[in-house]
Amino acid sequence: MTTTTLRPSPAGTGIPGKLSAAVSGRVRNVWGMTRRNLVHISREPMQLSDVTLQPVLFTVLFVYILGGGIPIPHGSYTDFALAGLLALNLVTSTMGTAVGLSTDLHGGIVDRFRALPMWQPAVLVGRSFADLMTSCLCALIVAVSGLAVGWRTDASAGAIIGGFALVLFFTYSLSWIAACVGLNSKSPESAASFGFIVLFPLAFISNALVPTQHMPGWLQAVADWNPVSAVAAGARQLWGNPNPSAAIHAWPMQHPVEAGLIWSALILAIAAPLASYFYRRRTTE
Amino acid sequence: MPNDMMIEAEELAKRYGETEALAGVDFAVPGGSILGLLGPNGAGKTTAVRILTTLALPDAGRARVAGVDVVGHPAEVRRHIGVAAQDATLDGLLSGRQNLVLVGELSDMGRRAARQRATELLAQFELTDASDRVLKGYSGGMRRRLDLAAALMTRPPVLFLDEPTTGLDPVSRQRVWEAVRELTAAGVTVLLTTQYLDEADALADQIVVIDHGRVIANGTPQELKEASRGARLEVTLTAPYPRAAEAIGSLTAGRVHTSEDGLRLSAGVDSAPGLATSVVRALDAAGVLVDNIEIRQPSLDDVFFSLTGGHLAPEDDQPGPGAADPEGARPEMEGAGA
């Protein structure tokens, strides 16, 4: 029996005294986790159907089937609907974050991550970044299918990008709420029910697909303060598309871009630390 | 406790709801050696590993890995350990290579270093041909080997292997054993849990037997076998001698059983130095001629079953002393305060 005690140090580690070393380590961890989740999508492309097929389907359904019956003052339903379709598709896609995290927690792989000397929140941040990338793909598909059915905008390139960025930022912050749900759900299936119970009402009780003026009074109040309404109206304002909500006196409808940004920042500031807390709690035994 | 201990557990206790998973467990593993943590399902083996690998917090007691407290500095502990856990803790949707590179990158290896090390390990574990296949298509044995490879990515000085060969075919088991032996030869400290006694016997320098969350035996495989005192004496005589059984009665631990033809004597004996000589002398003094004498050492299975309260099928009509008197099997062992 050899008694030589070899103590090889873990490769590439020094004493992370410098802040920059710690930060670059975290960035590497996050990027590693992001890539892992992107590889997952490439292995199971059907996972992507809710950000690829669904936008096309919804665009056709709403514009050609329902849109004809919804009159929009000063413009076409198609021009009105695109911002709403973008919000609808992106909001419902955050269900993927909840299901994905829940699946990781139940598969045992999180045990592997927790025994590694990595920055533990990278599990959550990497997931959110991968989902943001699929959201960008979704936004692109919404834009292309919108152009195909006749959506037009005269806005500057900056304003157009700004409109997409506003909805994407909101989606990103919402994905942290989805993360909280995924971290607290008993199974991936119950995480999926979050989509139907929370996300669909959130997306539909808004001005995304119909002007809120025709809703009953109490529902209209809810809709006008719904952050989904703010980002949809904000995108319409930036794109120069018809925005009937501009006639509503509620503050978020008067300042939809600001309201959308505030909502998103607020949600992110609360949900991200909360998700980190839930992750620690869920993985502590 | 000496300072060169790479894994130390002191009075570790852990409760999950009503279940007392660990009820005060002590052991220590010197650098470069293999500890076999042996016990039936639900004995607390995995809980001990989870605490030592920072996945679970102990309710009481202390644990140090590479001299670092697992509760106080979990992140530091993680830099020194490699873990191959029982559950599938690899990513089923990544290829074998992607799994290893991910583990490397999350352990602060550079991407290039991680790729290089992954290629090396894939070759070592004969997974090169399958390296770019998605893990879902791997056999159980391939997964186990990849699990072990993942644990070795950073060349950690301390390795935890939770039932590394459960469900493997004999050839794959041998491969894993060889890999573990090579590692300790290079100075790596290994804690391995197993339900297989032959595995502990073949690999471990030291065996800790736990049952119901308590250490019931701790020693080298040889010490445990001796401590069980379950050896059996078998004597074959040239002809039946009525006084033969009486002649050796004082040397055996139980009643001497004589076969019907009177030619074979058997009895449980306590292992003791020179026992065979004493038996032959006693028979010689009684004028008995001996054809053959055998003292059969207990297998580790005998030890295990006697310690955990299970029963071996008794030979003849006489239970072995170890099984009949489990307390008698314990006094020489540490941690017997259960």
Image (cartoon, coloured by chain):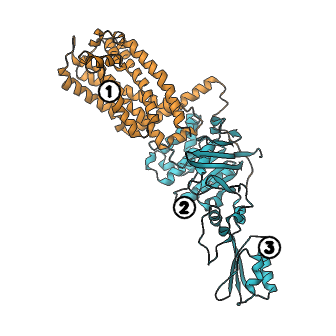
Chain colours: A orange, B cyan
Task: Name the residue carrying label 3.
Answer: B274
Respond whether the residues carrying marks 3 and 1 are from the same subunit: no
Of the residues under marks 3 and 2, which one precedes in the sequence? 2
Q: How far apart are marks 3 and 1 (CA)?
A: 85 Å
Task: Name the residue carrying label 2.
Answer: B170
Crowd rating for badge 3 (residues with CA inside 10 Å; few <14, some 14–19, many 20+)? few
Q: What type is the residue that disc 3 sits on? A: Gly
**A239 sits left or right of A184 in the view:** left
Between disc 3 and disc 2, the foreground one is 3
As helix, strand or loop, the secondary structure at mark 2 comes to: helix
Q: Which mark is residue B38?
A: none
Task: Name the residue carrying label 1.
Answer: A201
Chain ID, mark 2? B
x then y, percent, for residue A29: 54, 32
At 53% across and 34% down in the image, what residue appears? A281
As helix, strand or loop, the secondary structure at mark 1 comes to: helix
Crowd rating for badge 2 (residues with CA inside 10 Å; few <14, some 14–19, many 20+)? few
| Quarter of the C terminus of chain A within the rendering | top right
The mark tally for this picture is: 3
At 58% across and 26% down in the image, what residue appears? A24
x then y, percent, for residue B277: 79, 77
Between disc 1 and disc 2, the foreground one is 1
Chain ID, mark 3? B
Crowd rating for badge 1 (residues with CA inside 10 Å; few <14, some 14–19, many 20+)? few
**B242 sits left or right of A207 in the view:** right
**B188 sits left or right of B19 in the view:** right
Q: In which quarter of the image is residue A48?
A: top left
Q: What type is the residue that disc 2 sits on? A: Pro
Q: In this view, does B97 lie above or below B332?
A: above
State whether residue B66 appears in this view. yes
**B75 sits left or right of B280 in the view:** left
Q: In this view, does B91 lie above or below A126?
A: below
